[in-house]
Image (cartoon, helix red, strand yellow):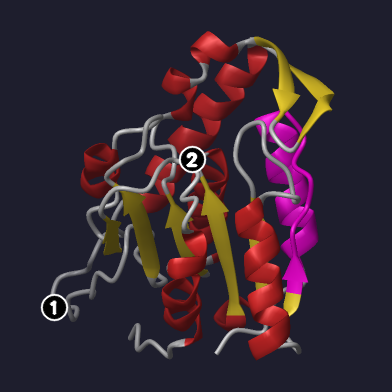
């Protein structure tokens, strides 16, 4: 059972995204006591990471979770490892530094063409730094001789993780996601698209996954 849920939107997206709005409505209808947080993320990955850490610094580890889409999925995986919390990744970016190199410059927000931001070259280095941090946190801890083997539940070694990947993703390679997040539970949607426009058909599965009790001993 979770008490706190964080939603992280993708590149050029916002808290006004259809997935964020639908999940918020679903929570209000089913679990109104859950604390919901869906911030507007700054363009700088470093600043985004600092904001995420500040927002969740007092959250209880064992009853907190994060959902992230696209670049937000990358951030969600990062904070899930940092704090050891449950996570759901929707068409997550596996290598955002590689994929966003061609997007440096002025960008508009999907939900509002009047809003824009500048994606700076130095943000690529910030993404690489966060990627390196994820690798460090993913490394299996050394096991002393005679110790009981550690059970592996997800990529972050600590908390349950669900990958939701669409085979019709026109932006990112869903098969790369499956390979990259091989330790996560997989929920593969045949067809759909990068935005998972039919999220309303799959949101309950994600929420049920988060509400399920897991034994991670």
38 above or below 144? Answer: above
The boundaries of the magenta stretch are 36-57
Determine whether, in the image, residue 158 is placed left or right of residue 185: right
Image location of residue 89, percent across then percent down: 45, 55
Which structural element holds mark 2? helix
Q: How crowded is mark 1: few (under 14 residues within 10 Å), some or many (20 or more)?
A: few
Which quadrant of the view contains residue 145? bottom left
**Mark 1 = which residue?**
146
The residue under the point 30% across, 43% down is: 177
Which numbered dot is residue 198?
Answer: none
Circle 2 sits on which residue? Answer: 133
Which label sits in the foreground, 1 or 2?
Answer: 2
Q: Does the magenta stretch include residue 54?
A: yes
Horizontal and vertical percent for residue 60? Answer: 67, 79
In-image side of 187 versus 20 (left or right) = left
Residue at x 37% of width, y 58% of height: 164
Question: Which quarter of the rendered picture does the C terminus lie within?
Answer: bottom left
Confirm whether residue 83 shows in the render: yes
Q: In this view, does 138 lie to the left or right of 147?
A: right
* 47 over 113 or under it: above or below: below
Q: Earlier in the sequence, mark 1 or mark 2?
A: 2
Left-right relation of 152 to 199? left
- Residue 88 is situated, as x and y percent measured from the top left of the image, at 46, 63
| Label 1: element kind | loop
- Label 1 and label 2: CA atoms lie apart by 29 Å
Name the quadrant of the N terminus. Answer: bottom right
Circle 2 packing at 10 Å, graded few (<14), some (14-19), many (20+), is some
Is residue 4 among the parts visible in the rendering?
no
- Look at 74% across and 71% down and name the residue there: 36
Furthest-left residue in this view? 146
Residue 131 is covered by the magenta coloring: no
At 79% from the left and 45% from the top, the residue drawn is 40
């Amino acid at each position: 059972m979770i008490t706190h849920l964080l939603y992280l939107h993708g590149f050029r997206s916002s808290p006004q995204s259809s997935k964020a709005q639908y999940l918020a409505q679903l929570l209000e209808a089913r679990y109104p006591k859950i604390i919901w947080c869906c911030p507007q993320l700054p363009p700088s990955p470093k600043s985004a990471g600092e904001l995420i850490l500040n927002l969740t610094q007092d959250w209880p580890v064992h009853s907190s979770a994060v959902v992230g889409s696209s670049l937000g999925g990358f951030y969600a995986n990062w904070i899930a490892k940092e704090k050891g919390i449950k996570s759901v990744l929707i068409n997550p970016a596996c290598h955002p530094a590689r994929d966003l190199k061609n997007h440096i410059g002025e960008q508009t927000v999907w939900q509002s063409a009047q809003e824009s931001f500048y994606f700076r070259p130095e943000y690529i280095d910030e993404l690489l730094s966060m990627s390196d941090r994820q690798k460090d946190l993913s490394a299996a801890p050394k096991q002393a001789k005679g110790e009981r083997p550690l059970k592996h539940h997800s990529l972050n070694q600590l908390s349950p993780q669900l990958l939701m990947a669409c085979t019709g993703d026109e932006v990112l390679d869903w098969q790369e996601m499956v390979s990259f997040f091989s330790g996560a539970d997989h929920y593969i949607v045949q067809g759909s698209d990068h935005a998972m426009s039919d999220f309303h058909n799959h949101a309950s599965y994600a929420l049920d996954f988060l509400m399920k009790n897991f034994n991670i001993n």
